Amino acid sequence: MNALLEMLMQLFERAALLLICLFFITRIPRFKETLQKNSHSPAELTLLTLIFCMFALFGTYTGIEVEGSLVNVRIIAIMAGGILFGPWVGIITGIVSGIHRYLIDIGGVTSIPCLITSILAGVVSGYIGRRVNRSKRWLVGIAAGMVCEALTMLLILVMAQPHGLGVDIVSKIGLPMIIGEVSIGLIVLLIQSVEGEKENIAARQAKLALDIANKTLPYFRSINAESLHTICSIIKEDIKADAVAITDTRDVLAYVGFGEERYHIGDEIISDVTKSTIRSGKITIRNHIADDKTPQIQSLLIIPLEERGEVTGTLKIYYRKAYKITYPLQTMAIGLSQIISTLMEVSRVEQIKEAANKAELKALQTKINPHFLFNALNAIASTTRTKPDKARELIINLSGYLRYNLELNDDLIEIHKELQQVSDYVEIEKARFGNRLQVKYVMDEVSVRIPSLIIQPLVENAINHGILKKKAPGTVTISVKDRGEKVRISVADTGVGIRDDVVDNLYHDQVPAKQIGLYNVHRRLKLMYGEGVIILKHDPGTEVYFDIPKEKS
């Protein structure tokens, strides 16, 4: 009895050594993060398999020799690996350690039974890891380990020659080996306690994300370069990052922190990693990478921002030290990105409504603008005697133009209705300015719905700030082109050309509030489709165009 108790204590000592090794491994941050994941990459599974194979081989080498057999903790390591990390780890560990046990004692009385039960333990542990409820795995693991060891004893009795030797071995090692499987439960509970920490981590990071959201909420009421810069500053400070950036699908919207002098608002995205994130819609983590513009940056986390299921931009977090993108940071950043996406979508909706209200106000002002009406009526009056038919057409044009503005609402309208309103406006202006103004239409046959009052302000701009600023006659060309999935609408003139400062102010949201013509069109398009107008300078004149996506049938 004393011999059995002593053997059992020695077995527990070896199991305790396994536990101590595992405990210290779980304190290593990168390994701890691996344990806390719900799923593992092939590389991570390979690492875990190597670790448990080493534990199983260690169990064999430290075994206590009894009558040609080894009292060891090999089955404990196999079962623990498979239960915790699935069939891949369990089965491979079982095969490797089982073959190793056979090869170091070929022809030994227990070598074949140990080979068989090692492989069986790997299969059974993998099944437990996949099929058994997490809270019961430690208990089921103990029971399965005891069954495997009992089967080993049975195989020794059956296969041992002479039979008496098998009986002698089993009588000495059977009970300690079976009882020793209790250690499986201890190992499983240890690792599960580390996995359970991720719930506390998630709670803390969720609170941090909500705190950041609460601080940044006021700045989402009006999204512009200044407010996004402030939002990035708050995020950078609260998560102790070296730099934080927000982009849309094409340009940098805000950049705060290390390397800020190298990035400017409105710069086009040049990072292939960012472009890849936008295309795939998946989180990108780089824990040891040098950025082209800022080679001192070593860690990078890029999270796509989504609205209505489509990627509209990214949140980028930078650190100058490698391996700073930890599991807690990923958890927080994902939650924060979801909140930011929601806030930006709500903000866009509010700004669309505000822009629509401004557009409606502009239309109302134009409709009742005494100066506009006076000029239109004066043009009609001047043609009444000489060209009565033309006068009647102009009256119809003016009537149609005013009726369109009167019926204006926030809904999308067919492009043909918008073009009719533009045509009415153009005919009135041509009557006023005669040969000074020529208008051309280049139209593809398309059917698309667009925001109301989106083309006429561009035509008005082209006439008043392009053609009329020049003494010589000029031409405005209105173009609608079918470009596959999109329709491109452009207004070009041969006038004096737009000033560079006007273009810069437009792209940087610094246009005075009272100038709501071109700027209002730009903002409405950007809020609704993610991209505003594009301005090209020609010689002579200016071209302004934008793309409208076709509705998916």
Image: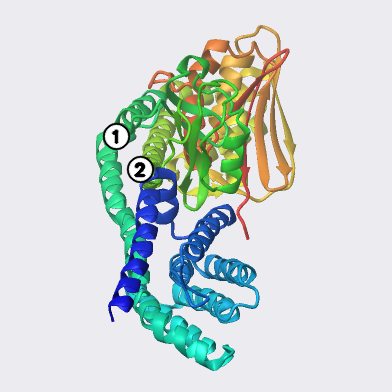
Is residue 101 found left or right of 306 in the rendered image?
A: right
For image coordinates 68% across by 15% down, the residue present is: 541
Label 1: how many Cα within 10 Å (few below 14, some 14–19, many 20+)? many
Question: Residue 281: image x %, image y %?
Answer: 55, 48
Check contact, mark 2 vs mark 1: CB within 8 A: yes
Task: Return the residue nearer the eye: 491 or 472.
Answer: 491
Question: Residue 530: image x %, image y %?
Answer: 52, 38
Determine if residue 50 is in view.
Answer: yes
Task: Return the residue nearer the eye: 478 or 110.
Answer: 110
Task: Return the residue nearer the eye: 165 or 10.
Answer: 165
Residue 189, relative to residue 221: is it above or below?
A: below
Figure label count = 2
- Going by the numbered disc 2, the residue's amino acid type is Leu
Dot 2 falls on a residue whose secondary structure is helix
Question: Residue 547: image x %, image y %?
Answer: 62, 38
For image coordinates 58% across by 29% down, the residue present is: 269
Label 2: how many Cα within 10 Å (few below 14, some 14–19, many 20+)? some
Residue 59, relative to residue 349: is it above or below?
A: below
- Going by the numbered disc 1, the residue's amino acid type is Thr
The numbered disc on residue 343 is 2
As measured in the structure, the alpha-carbon distance from the residue carrying label 2 to the one carrying label 1 is 10 Å
Residue 27, relative to residue 295: is it above or below?
A: below
The numbered disc on residue 216 is 1
Quarter of the rendering containing residue 364 = top left
Query: Counting residues from the N terminus, which is met first, the one under dot 2 or under dot 1?
Result: 1
For image coordinates 51% across by 92% down, the residue present is: 164
